[in-house]
Amino acid sequence: MLVFAVSARGGTGRSVTGCNVAYRLALHGRDVCYLDFDFGSSTSRAIFGIEAASHGTSSGSGLHAYFAGHAAEPEQLDIWGRSDRRELRRNPLASGRLVLVPGDRGGREFPACNGLADRCARLFLRLDDEFDIILVDLSAGRSHAAENVAGRDRPPGVRGRGVALAAGIANAETT
């Protein structure tokens, strides 16, 4: 299942809440992948305690390289094994996988380009076969991307798949 964490502005707690949800689901035996599309923030990497990727991965195979066609697959960081936080390195026996997929070091928002939607859909579909939950943390103000995936404009192949739109999961703002 794809879960999109979105909000209209920054500072609402979206990334913190998303990380905590991913962690709790993994503790309960679910295989969880956290896709960090919030490139301007290092919140998820700080919460998961992966200092080596605090500003994105330097491997050359992060989300930016994948979407640009420079990497066959984006890097997956095993949080249980890679975290600098001792409490996260204790992988309880009944827990599921907990994986972070970061952007590349110095990466910014993706420009709209030909093939981006198709590469994104292929990634979602492949991860959906591998994980129980894929939590996608979109940067603030990018809710239109989640609405497209959750709505009628969902890319081919993603239609009919379980998608949850957690709009403002930690956002108490009113309109």
Image: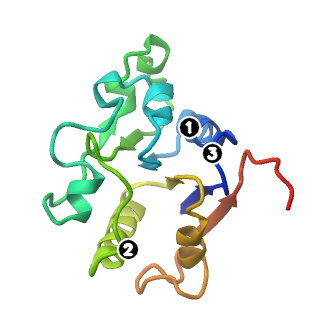
Which mark is first along the chain, 3 or 1? Answer: 3
Residue at mark 1 = 19
The disc labelled 3 sits on which kind of residue?
Gly
* Quadrant of the rendered image containing residue 16: top right
The answer for how far apart the CA atoms under marks 1 and 3 are is 16 Å
The answer for how far apart the CA atoms under marks 2 and 1 are is 22 Å
**Front in this rendered view, residue 124 or 141:** 141
- Residue neighbourhood size for the residue with mark 3, other residues' Cα within 10 Å, grouped as few (<14), some (14–19), many (≥20): some
Question: Residue 93: in sight, yes or no?
Answer: no
Residue at mark 3 = 10
Q: Give residue 44's position: percent from left, percent from top.
A: 48, 35
* Side of 144 where 65 appears, left or right: left
- In the image as oriented, which residue stretches furthest toward the top? 86
Q: Give residue 160's position: percent from left, percent from top.
A: 54, 82
The figure's colour scheme reads rainbow
The disc labelled 1 sits on which kind of residue?
Cys
Residue at mark 2 = 121
* Side of 11 where 84 appears, left or right: left
Which secondary structure lies at badge 1?
Answer: helix
Which one is closest to the eye, mark 3 or mark 2? 3
The correct choice, above or below, for 88 with respect to 151 in the image is above
The disc labelled 2 sits on which kind of residue?
Ala
- Residue neighbourhood size for the residue with mark 2, other residues' Cα within 10 Å, grouped as few (<14), some (14–19), many (≥20): some
* Quadrant of the rendered image containing residue 76: top left
Which mark is first along the chain, 1 or 2? Answer: 1
Which one is closest to the eye, mark 1 or mark 3? 3
Q: Residue at x 60, y 74 (%)?
A: 147
**Front in this rendered view, residue 46 or 75:** 46
Tag 2–tag 1 contact (CB < 8 Å): no
